[in-house]
Image (cartoon, helix red, strand yellow):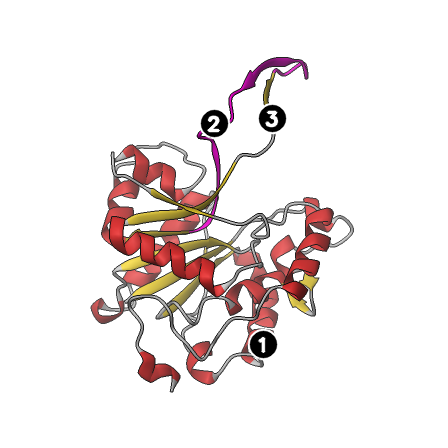
Amino acid sequence: KTAALIVAAGRGSRATRGDRRPKQYVAIGGGPVLGHTLMAFPPFADAIQVVIHPDDAESYADVLAWVEKRLPPAAFAKILPPVPGGATRQQSVLCGLEALAANGSEQIPSHVLIHDAARPCLVDEWVDRVFEAAVRSGAAIFALPVAGTIKRVGPDHVIQETVPREHLWEAQTPQVFRRELLLEAYAKREGFQATDEAQLVERLGHKVTVVPGSPINLKIATKEDLRLAEQALKALPKPKLENRLHPFADDDLWR
């Protein structure tokens, strides 16, 4: 069993000036950002758990209505009832993991994919590569090698140093982990506030495989990102809902 855990509890508003909705509910490419994100995962996950802000139940219901019109019934049925998130990303992911465990032992996944709701520009091949790497190593993430010149800047906006970019990568999502490994990482975090789940797994001393990502897999943070994502969605291939590509595939569900 595998599960996709979509983190959608954030309140980010930089991308939505003049629009009171969080960015994951803003419309691009004919549908909500979160709707496009959800459409990417039925080919890969046996269950899809979304973690939302408690105040967003109505907005999320609108997203589900949009998605339901575009997915086959068997694919749409994989989307579990949403659960409320916590005050931080880490707390929200933990809420999602606990909800997956509460569904019964037969539904508890062996691997969990974690993805940002505000990354709607995905291609099947990318998700497949991350899954395959995680099956081999237990933990894998999408990431991009840093291409620009990196400066460390002080609070006075003065450059302190130029940081060598060799071996530097920018982490993205999806990130896929063996569920037991991820739970151990959370249990041993001891108040540590990580910026992504891979950092928690790294603290265990477990190796995390990096799968080369794509600049198209952008995380929407500004209005400019919304415009870029809308153009990317027009150019990217649509999810192949008739196939399940990752190693846990059950093709009977898609015949």
**Nearest to N terminus: mark 3 or mark 2:** 3
Query: Mark 3 belongs to which amino acid?
Result: Thr
Residues at marks 3 and 2, CA–CA distance in whole angstroms: 10 Å
Quadrant showing the C terminus? bottom left
Q: Residues within 10 Å of mark 3 (few under 14, many from 20)?
A: few
Q: How many marks?
A: 3
Q: Given the current orientation, which residue lies at the most extreme right position?
A: 18
**Cα distance, mark 1 to mark 2?**
46 Å
239 or 84: nearer the eye? 239
Q: Which mark is residue 10?
A: none
204, above or below 160, in the image:
below
Quadrant that contains the N terminus: bottom left
Question: Can residue 146 be seen in this snapshot?
Answer: yes
| Image location (x, y in percent) of residue 150 | 58, 25
Q: Position of residue 177 (x, y in %)?
A: 31, 51
For label 1, count other residues whose C-alpha is less than 10 Å away and answer few (under 14), some (14-19) or many (20+): few
Q: What percent of the width, then of the height, locates residue 190? A: 30, 32
The magenta span reads 154-174
- Nearer to us in this view, 225 or 77: 225
Q: Earlier in the sequence, mark 3 or mark 1?
A: 1
Residue 85 placement, left or right of 179: right
Residue identifier under label 2: 166
Q: Which mark is residue 149?
A: 3
**Labelled pair 3, 2 in contact (Cβ < 8 Å):** no
Q: Are marks 1 and 2 in contact (CB under 8 Å)?
A: no
Which is in the foreground here, disc 1 or disc 2?
A: 2
- Which one is in front, 194 or 232? 232
Graded by Cα atoms within 10 Å as few (under 14), some (14 to 19) or many (20 or more), the crowding at tag 2 reads few
Where disc 2 sits, the SS reads loop
Q: Is residue 167 magenta?
A: yes
Q: Residue at x 39, y 67 (%)?
A: 44
State the residue position of label 1.
65
